[in-house]
Image (cartoon, helix red, strand yellow):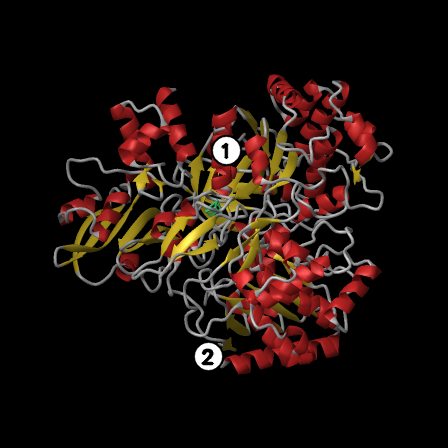
């Protein structure tokens, strides 16, 4: 089979992929002709082939726990929805969509809800990701337009990353920024309370106090005004300045006041201001650290203010740049996937409602915004929304205060879940489960962070009875009596309708005008090349507002969160390099699992010492919402008083690491985006008697220990464990059948049992204190058969006798090289560069996602 050109299903960079269904395992390569990545892929994209397994897929419709035909399941959904609307009104129904959906799926779901059911209760998990940026764009520009492209990063002299760990969350883009620095001396400033991998690579890192971004940005704008860097001519022509704007900016004070407010060294603040003054070609790239805040919209507007007032917008290498987390967050925005807009970037003004009614010949177009994500689930809990349809997302994990979300789902009178995965934390509450096609099987388009529309093309057949999401929604609409409006033959029909709507009676009012594709043939759709709509927005200094001018937005500085007596710490959360959202896909990849195998809570040493916590201890992280267990990792990467945890772990993989349960459901008043990055919290050492791990070919049917994290391996499973009481009875349940060899040292509270069959390792359970347990890598290699088979004594030791095994987390997921191995090589061979490490070990020579970590090891060696 020939390779198909498709697009990565993970982050908003939107990398092009060449994919081929091969015997055994698919082949995945970066597409050298795709402008977003020019052939590069990060570790997640490069390891997609490992995730293309039928394991765990939802293969057939399920109604009330039993397999059902499509006809029965769709008929039931249509009947229940019609009855709900009839008896309780259109707003008693809700859809909760996902940035994983293709634009065509999104378009059809939005059309059914907002045009035919007559409610705008259709929101998306993109609400959690970048809705503050959307609200800020609308406030400043009059329309949700991202005014930058990736080539601006190639042309900028200064790139400021605020609240963005691009090295882990958008690795290919980060590599591009580093390449620009190499080529043209671009300076990189990172503004982030944590010293992330992105910060490690920066020329200047401003580790500001959480919640002080507005103070810093307004301080910079005040400094620009005092230094004559405000572009008065541009403002006079293109920007409306509201009364009191400059006095609100001046409140930030001089650089010394800014430094005090942000808890930064004055010299660093001055260095940042100087770089900004010297380098007009500035791109300010922002992401979840700005958006996921109860002041997210104001924070984003502070960045837009800065660029508008200095005229750094609409020019090559100069723009504010919101980077989206999901592969099709932008496509969802274009078709009205958010409850706060209609399709094609239209708001709920009467003209737009009427325009949509005409275009769709729709009986009942929603005339007011619907419920945003957090409010939608509150309405489900309160009984105001009585039927909910969730597509391609896992809100029981990802929404804040996820325990309350679960209560809402449990109480929902009729819950429909469309997903490609059979069992998720959300779908266990579903009355109807509908099997959806997955990446590699789906056919449609996505829009990346720079407004570039690319095709996702199928190269695999959907397993079982899985169907595309657009087809599922259209079949329900047909059964509700709207067959003519949903009579699509395929995604090309939907795409044409979408682009025609964008152009329909537009007359230049909306910049989202895709009309050039209105007459695209099926063959043209099949062969569509990636294309960017909107060109260089605002190059003419005109904005889509009534007077053609952009708006500056006055705001008061945020007050940083004060520590509370019972909750003295501030919990921050984010992504790991090699995992994606709730791990339903990346969790299937043994290579990706080994970079950060467990959910760690990162704690400053002073806070750990005060709580009597040591590296590797199990820690109970508690917030006013809930508590969960994490493994302690002591770090000086953030200031005392702060904690950091990952967002990925679910009931499916672990009894701990449940970050969604912990975060509080406070939202930004403009966007409704939750403030995930700052939840008051407390920590305590968890009361456990033992720690341990199991390496085994098969996963035990039940684990049953206080703490357990399941990690997929090439030849089996690794389970990290901790528990109370005598571990011996647990061993009976955990280990596979076979010949057992045991070493029990009760005095040192050690229990080690290995199981072998025909000279091969079947399983090993090693229990002891955290520091007494060997690294896992060698036993994992024994299970996979990578290394020469060893003796039972060596298995019990967890290492070859007389040798020190490679240890530490997996650093390079492409070539499976551990951090320890890289550190050893640097020391032994006196390596001085990432390239030298790559030549010797291959680590870092493929996707490049691990290069920041290699550079950190090199720096440590020379420190
Ligand atoms: Fe996929 Fe990585 Fe590219 Fe993001 S940077 S689109 S995750 S390959």
> In terms of image quadrants, where is residue 151?
top right
> In terms of image quadrants, where is residue 559?
top right
Pick whichever of labels 1 and 2 is earlier in the sequence: 2
Which image quarter holds the C terminus?
Answer: top left
Q: What separation in Å lies between label 1 and label 2 (alpha carbons)? A: 48 Å
Q: Looking at the image, is 782 positioned above or below residue 460?
A: above
> In terms of image quadrants, where is residue 735?
bottom left
Mark 1 CB near ligand 1 (8 Å cut): no
Q: Quick one: SS at disc 1?
A: helix
Disc ID at residue 67: 2
Disc ID at residue 85: none
Mark 2 CB near ligand 1 (8 Å cut): no
In this rendered view, identify the residue nearer to me: 261 or 323. 323
Answer whether residue 452 is visible to the viewer in this image: no
Q: Is residue 323 left or right of residue 754?
A: right
Mark 1 vs mark 2: in front: 1
Q: Is residue 678 left or right of residue 223?
A: left
Q: Is residue 562 left or right of residue 436?
A: right
Q: Quick one: SS at disc 2?
A: strand
Q: Looking at the image, is 517 positioned above or below residue 187?
A: below
Residue 577 drawn at (x, y percent): 45, 43
Give the residue at mark 1: 198
Residue 584 drawn at (x, y percent): 45, 58
Answer whether residue 223 is visible to the viewer in this image: yes
């Amino acid at each position: 089979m020939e390779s198909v050109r498709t697009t990565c299903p993970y982050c908003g960079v939107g990398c092009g992929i060449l994919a081929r269904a091969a015997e055994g395992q698919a082949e995945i390569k970066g597409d050298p002709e795709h402008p977003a990545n020019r052939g590069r892929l990060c570790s997640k994209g490069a390891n997609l082939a490992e995730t293309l397994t039928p394991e765990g897929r939802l293969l057939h419709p399920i109604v009330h726990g039993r397999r059902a035909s499509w006809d029965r399941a769709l008929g039931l959904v249509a009947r229940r929805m019609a009855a709900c609307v009839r008896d309780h009104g259109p707003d008693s129904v809700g859809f909760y969509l996902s940035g994983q959906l293709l634009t065509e799926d999104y378009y059809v779901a939005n059309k059914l809800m907002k045009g035919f059911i007559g409610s705008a209760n259709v929101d998306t998990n993109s609400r959690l990701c970048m809705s503050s940026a959307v609200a800020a764009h609308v406030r400043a520009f009059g329309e949700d337009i991202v005014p930058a492209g990736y080539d601006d990063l190639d042309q900028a002299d200064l790139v400021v990353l605020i609240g963005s760990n691009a090295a882990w969350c958008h690795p290919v883009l980060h590599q591009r920024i580093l390449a620009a620095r190499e080529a043209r001396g671009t300076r990189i400033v990172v503004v982030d309370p944590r010293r992330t991998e992105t910060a490690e690579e920066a020329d200047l890192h401003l580790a500001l106090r959480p919640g002080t971004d507005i103070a810093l940005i307004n301080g910079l704008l005040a400094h620009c005004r005092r230094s004559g860097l405000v572009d008065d001519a541009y403002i006079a022509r293109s920007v409306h300045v509201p009364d009191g704007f400059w006095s609100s900016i001046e409140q930030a004070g001089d650089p010394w006041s800014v430094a005090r407010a942000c808890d930064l060294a004055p010299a660093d603040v001055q260095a940042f201001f100087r770089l900004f003054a010297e380098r007009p070609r500035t791109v300010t790239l922002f992401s979840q650290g700005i958006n996921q805040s109860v002041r997210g919209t104001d924070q984003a507007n502070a960045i837009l203010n800065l660029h508008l007032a200095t005229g750094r917008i609409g020019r090559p290498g100069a723009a504010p740049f919101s980077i989206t987390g999901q592969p099709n967050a932008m496509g969802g925005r274009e078709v009205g996937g958010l409850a706060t807009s209609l399709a094609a970037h239209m708001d709920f003004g009467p003209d737009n409602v009427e325009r949509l009614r005409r275009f769709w010949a729709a009986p009942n177009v929603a005339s007011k915004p619907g419920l945003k994500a957090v409010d939608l689930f509150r309405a489900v809990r309160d009984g105001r929304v009585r039927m909910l349809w969730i597509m391609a997302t896992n809100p029981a994990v990802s929404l804040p205060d996820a325990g309350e979300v679960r209560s809402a789902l449990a109480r929902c009178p009729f819950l429909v879940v469309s997903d490609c995965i059979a069992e998720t934390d959300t779908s266990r509450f579903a009355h109807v489960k509908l099997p959806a096609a997955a990446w590699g099987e789906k056919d449609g388009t996505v829009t990346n962070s720079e407004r570039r529309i690319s095709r996702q093309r199928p190269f695999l057949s959907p397993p079982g009875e899985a169907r595309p999401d657009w087809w599922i929604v259209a079949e329900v609409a047909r059964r509700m009596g709207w067959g003519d409006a949903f009579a699509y033959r395929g995604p090309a029909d939907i795409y044409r309708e979408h682009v025609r709507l964008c152009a329909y009676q537009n007359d230049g009012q909306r910049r989202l005008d895709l009309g050039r594709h209105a007459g695209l043939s099926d063959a043209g759709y099949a062969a569509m090349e990636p294309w960017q709509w909107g060109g260089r927005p605002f190059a003419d200094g005109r904005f889509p507002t009534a007077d053609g001018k952009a708006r500056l937005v006055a705001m008061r500085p945020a007050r940083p969160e004060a520590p509370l007596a019972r909750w003295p710490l501030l919990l921050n959360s984010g992504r790991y390099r090699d995992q994606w959202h709730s791990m339903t896909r990346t969790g299937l990849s043994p290579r990706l699992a080994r970079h950060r195998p467990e959910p760690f809570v990162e704690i400053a040493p002073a806070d750990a010492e005060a709580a009597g916590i040591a590296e590797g201890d199990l820690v109970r992280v508690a917030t006013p919402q809930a508590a969960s267990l994490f493994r302690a990792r002591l770090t000086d990467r953030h200031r005392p008083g702060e904690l950091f945890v990952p967002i990925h772990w679910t009931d499916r993989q672990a009894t701990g690491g449940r970050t969604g349960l912990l975060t509080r459901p406070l939202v930004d008043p403009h966007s409704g985006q939750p403030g995930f990055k700052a939840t008051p919290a407390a920590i305590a050492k968890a009361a456990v008697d033992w720690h341990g791990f199991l390496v085994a070919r098969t996963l035990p049917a039940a684990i049953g220990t206080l703490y357990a994290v399941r990690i997929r391996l090439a030849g089996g499973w690794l389970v990290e464990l901790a528990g109370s009481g005598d571990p011996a009875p647990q061993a009976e349940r955990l280990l596979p059948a076979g010949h057992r060899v045991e070493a029990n040292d009760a005095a040192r509270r050690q229990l080690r049992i290995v199981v072998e069959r025909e000279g091969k390792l079947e399983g090993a359970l090693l229990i002891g204190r955290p520091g007494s347990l060997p690294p896992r890598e060698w036993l994992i290699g024994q299970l996979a058969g990578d290394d020469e088979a060893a003796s039972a004594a060596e298995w019990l030791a967890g290492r070859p006798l007389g040798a020190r095994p490679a240890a530490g987390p997996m650093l390079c997921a492409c070539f499976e090289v551990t951090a320890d191995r890289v550190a050893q090589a640097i020391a032994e061979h006196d390596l001085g560069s990432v390239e030298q490490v790559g030549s010797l070990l291959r680590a870092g020579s493929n996707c490049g996602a691990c290069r920041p970590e290699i550079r950190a090891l090199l720096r440590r060696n020379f420190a």
